[in-house]
Amino acid sequence: MNWPQRFEAELVRLGVQPVVARRLTADTAAQAGEHDADPDGFFGPAHLYARHLVAELQTPAAGTAPERCVPGQVMLQLSGVGKRYRRRAVFSGVDLTVRGGEVAAIVGANGCGKSTLLRICAGLTPPSCGTVHRTRRVGFVPQDGGTAGWLTAEEHFTLFGAAAGMVPRKAISTGTHLASLLAWRPSRVQPVQELSGGTRQKLNLVLGELHGPDLLLLDEPYQGFDQGSYLDFWRQVRSWRDAGRAVVVVTHLLHELQNVDHVLDLGAVAGRVA
Amino acid sequence: MTPRPWLHGFLDLCLLAMLRERPDYGYGLAQRLAAAGVADIPGGTLYPALLRLEQQGLASPSWAPSESGPRRKYYEITPAGLAALQAQAAEWRAFRDGVDLLIGAPVR
Amino acid sequence: MTALVVAGLSAREVTRRRTAMLLVISLPLWFYLVRRDLTGQSMRMLTLGIAWAVSTLTLFVVNASRGVDPRLRVSGASVAGIIGGRLIAMSGFGVLLATAYLILVAIDQDIQRFWAIAVTMLITALIAAPFGSLVGALLPRELEGALALLSVCAVQMLADPAGLTAKFMPFWSGREIGTYAVDGTGIEFLWRGLAHGALVWALCTGLTLAVFARRLRLARYPEPVPDSR
């Protein structure tokens, strides 16, 4: 494949309508022509420029307020949730309501139970007290682990797809597309244990959203990301939110809190208890 | 030449301002930006921005033949583009005045 | 559906651990070669070798998937699908391994009731998979599990087969059917062995599923009440 073909194929893969992709490809060829330049030298690698272009076209106009959809139905509701291990109370009295189209951040010092709370939301750990209401379709991305070292990324897509009732082909194409949104092209042969930490986290993230859940639970999912991947990640969070999904993210990066709708400071809750 | 991060927020403004003067195509706009001393802008930044203006309805494209080489895509500013230009220009002035105020006294 | 995908991928996962695979496949061979001159002894050792190899490999597979399983559950997989799939894969591996050694035995030894030896090895391989997964379910660390399996196999090897201790060991069935095959004892040895084998298999499979059903259980939360916004 030559540059325009690769470019067009990548646009389609990124979800651009085939007709639009064809037009953009023609435009791009003409633009390189204006400068009498070879597209590869002028725009860089086809797939990267395609990604860049798609991202640019999704950016809202400067000077206009970014469109935000109205928060939808409640996806997660915690009231008075607490957890204790034997006599030690980790936290108690946690209240949180997250609706579709909202992002909630859970912050707090190490050991204050952020991951435990997220596992309670996922249903993997039962709360000691309080009530949880939650939508059925949920995606969970743990902080580490959660992958099988000897399988490839595609095999993970198949496995997690099967868990959610997807046929392998659909699971693989969905996984590959979601990976491309994080600027990652999974290798077909490389076992996951040979991936870098950041790339493994991308896999982790893709596996969490493979089945299109209504509520995403993310436990510091950007560890090991480089700057670009980090920006891609938060762009993804915004696009989930704009698509009406609810996101709960455990984080320690306070400068990201301006982008979220709710902040739950678990350290403060725990402090109140003690 | 301006470092790119500075230009990033105001590229749309610059493009709209140039298009208000007269319709132009990509290469011409790049030349004018460079001639004004604002930026030597790479194609990979310029063209996505133009496409975005087109998609947002701030500039409308039309194809015109050129004397040499392939036909060109000319952009013309739309009424919505003029409104956006005004809003962004005001934003820019406020920003510039603010920065001037901050750096003005000690430098002089 | 889930079980079959899990089974296929577990099989692939296992074949990629080349060194471990090689060691596990060759382990029964060393057991066999030590007393190759004595048919009865060599059969017993070979069967035990297969038991140890399959159960240890299953243990590793079960432990390796500790991180993945809860996530698969959250994505919607059932415990039976996940654990069942893994047991299918490892039982399949066990059957393959047993068949390969049966061919070796057919060539290398002269046995009256060869079909009974086939039953011995297959039943042992089929028990070894759920037994290994049960040990893996109860002992979370690989080293602990491997040591437990070693102890079981050692006791099995050394205990008097007529005594009570041996009967409480998981692979006693193989020993009984093996005696029937090699020493030409009465048919009651075969039935006893088959009954013991079926019981142990059902017990190990059931307990494995029970332990994982508990460990991988998901809290059931009610859906939020839809509001009128």
Image (tube, grey):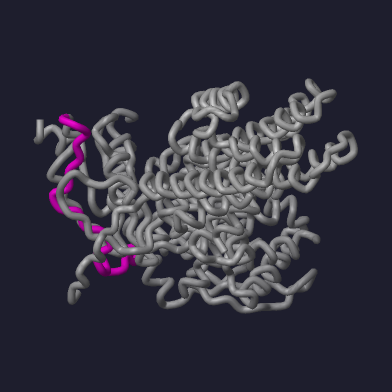
Q: Position of residue B35 (x, y in %)?
A: 59, 52
Q: Is residue A38 above or below residue A146?
A: below
Q: Is residue C161 above or below residue A264?
A: above
Question: Which residue occupies 64% across, 69% down?
Answer: A24
Question: Does the magenta segment cover residue A15?
Answer: no
Residue C93 in sight from this viewpoint: no
Quadrant housing the C terminus of chain C: bottom left
Q: Is residue A31 above or below residue A266?
A: below
For residue C94, what is the image quadrant?
Answer: top right
Camera-nearest residue between A139 and B96: A139
Indicate left or right for B75 with B86 as reference. Answer: right
Residue extent of the magenta highlight? A64-87
Indicate left or right for A127 with C84 as reference. Answer: left
Q: Position of residue A175 (x, y in %)?
A: 57, 57
For residue A128, what is the image quadrant?
Answer: top left
Q: Position of residue A221 (x, y in %)?
A: 43, 43
Question: Which residue occupies 26% across, 39% down?
Answer: A107
Question: Which residue occupies 64% across, 65% down?
Answer: A169
Quadrant housing the N terminus of chain C: bottom right
Residue C78 in sight from this viewpoint: yes
Q: Is residue C75 above or below residue C116?
A: below
Camera-nearest residue between A274 and C202: C202
Farthest-out residue, front: C186
Camera-nearest residue between B7 and B98: B7
